[in-house]
Amino acid sequence: MDSSPSADLVFDRKWVLEQIGGDAGLLHDIIEVFLVDCPDIRQQINAALHAGELKALHAAAHCAKSAVGNFGAPAAVKAAIELEEATKKGETAQLERLTNSLCQALIEVENTLRLELV
Amino acid sequence: MLIAIIEDTPVNLLVMQSLVKRLGAHDCQIFSDAEFGLAWCQDNAPDLIIVDYMMPSLDGLEFIRRCRSTPALQERPILMVTAAAERSVRYAALEAGASDFLTKPIDTHEFTPRVRNMLQLRAAMAATTHRADELAVAVRQATEEIQMRERETIMRLARAAEFRDPETGSHILRMAHYSAIIAQHLGLPDETVDLLLSAAPMHDVGKLGTPDHILLKPGRLTPDEMEIMRQHASIGYEILRNSSSPMLQMAAEIALSHHEKYDGTGYPQGKIGEDIPLTGRIVAVADVFDALTSARPYKEAWDLEHAREHLLAGRGTHFDPVCVDMFLDNWNEILDIRSIYQD
């Protein structure tokens, strides 16, 4: 079994189903939960950036990585890791760009997943 | 099995909860707040705890540390959920007491066997603990039964000796309880008081070796007869000594020493003061008091006041003064025993 999701797909349906034991019902449920949760996470990321709170920004980026990682979403996971690393290293000049990048990637995942529910 | 999942990301919580449900009819409790989850775990001691590493109020490492410092959770399996790359976190988690790890994103091919293994481990541990508890109960019951039989055998031996003597079966019960009252108020440990209660009745077992014509002689004994009579202390000691039973060891000590006197004028060894074993000093008071206040074929029972005066008169000469004080200071308890065990 290939344990990595496709690098080319925003959402690797086959890989996710493999991860959760082929349960399409569960996939549907976790998409619904994610679509409720993800806007909150983006809001937390932006709030932490504007407040200049690196610790909160790191925690929110980690939370985004943890949540979106369930769907493969390699671009969003990569953006979350970059933001986590930048907050750890205190690279403040990069934070706004990386935050925007992560939020865009998350929105892209949300939009893709929304189509799954149609 | 009772399973707790503590994870602040709703999607992960849902995935893990769903995968656990597939493992069987387990009771799965989920918590997105780590502090609340910890409090619940401390109160309910679940069979398995699955906890995320990075959470806002309390991280997974501290969560595990607090679990391990809770007696009910010290042995419970705890799985910590981490990203595969977080090696240093994994080492710290092992140090904190994590049993194993789960990698994020959750993969059923890893999650399911690891959780199943932990549940099997927990079931085996619970079965071992249960078996150990059963064995402990069985051993305790067997030990109690052996002790009970030992006490019964000893009591029958003591009664056999009493049957050869004008004294009654109630005498050995009263003097044993009087002895226990003195020992208790001297502050001796409960176990010692219990042993004394069982050992004191054997104080005169050596009379089994005293010839009938002396033991049962109605009149005053000649000096030679008195000498033979006094041998019952040493004979009792010979009958009882060299046992591995703490009770018989104490009984041997009492048999040998209960006719010693505090001023050294007693027998058979003429020991003085605290050289006389404490058990012997205690039994001397109890035995003499009961002998005085009991009727015998050759004498009337003394009245209580007369017997009290005799103990006071012998305080520091015949008897250990502290033992006499403990006896007289707890007079109501003595009277209770006297009324319970009547001839």
Image: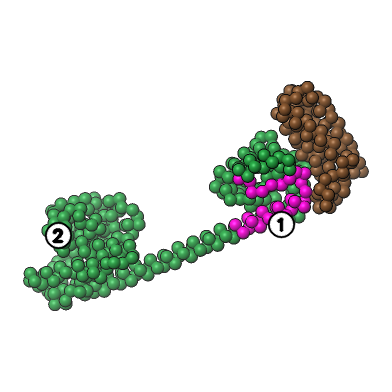
Chain colours: A brown, B green
Residue B309: horizontal and vertical position, in percent?
14, 54
The residue singled out by tag 1 in the image is: B25
**Label 1: chain?**
B
Q: Residue at x 84, y 40 (%)?
A: A73
Q: Residue furthest left?
A: B222
**Corner quadrant of residue A67:** top right
Q: Residue at x 33, y 65 (%)?
A: B244
Cα separation, mark 2 vs mark 1, equals 77 Å
Bounds of the magenta span?
B97-125
Residue A39 in magenta? no
Residue B88: horizontal and vertical position, in percent?
67, 39
Q: Which SS type dominates the magenta stretch?
A: helix
**Corner quadrant of residue B306:** bottom left
**Corner quadrant of residue B250:** bottom left
Residue B113 in magenta? yes
Q: Residue at x 75, y 43 (%)?
A: B104
- Specify whether residue A23 is in view: no
Q: Is residue B170 left or right of residue B104?
A: left
Q: Secondary structure at mark 1?
A: loop
Q: Residue at x 66, y 37 (%)?
A: B59
Q: Is residue B307 left or right of residue B222?
A: right
Q: Looking at the image, which is closer to me, B155 or A54?
A: A54
Q: Amino acid at mark 1?
A: Ala
Task: Say which mark, if any, is on residue B270.
Answer: 2
Badge 2 crowding class, 10 Å Cα cut-off, few under 14, some 14 to 19, many 20 or more, is: some
Q: Is residue B123 left or right of residue A2?
A: left
Split into 4 quadrants, where in the image is the C terminus of chain B?
Answer: bottom left
Residue B15: horizontal and vertical position, in percent?
77, 47
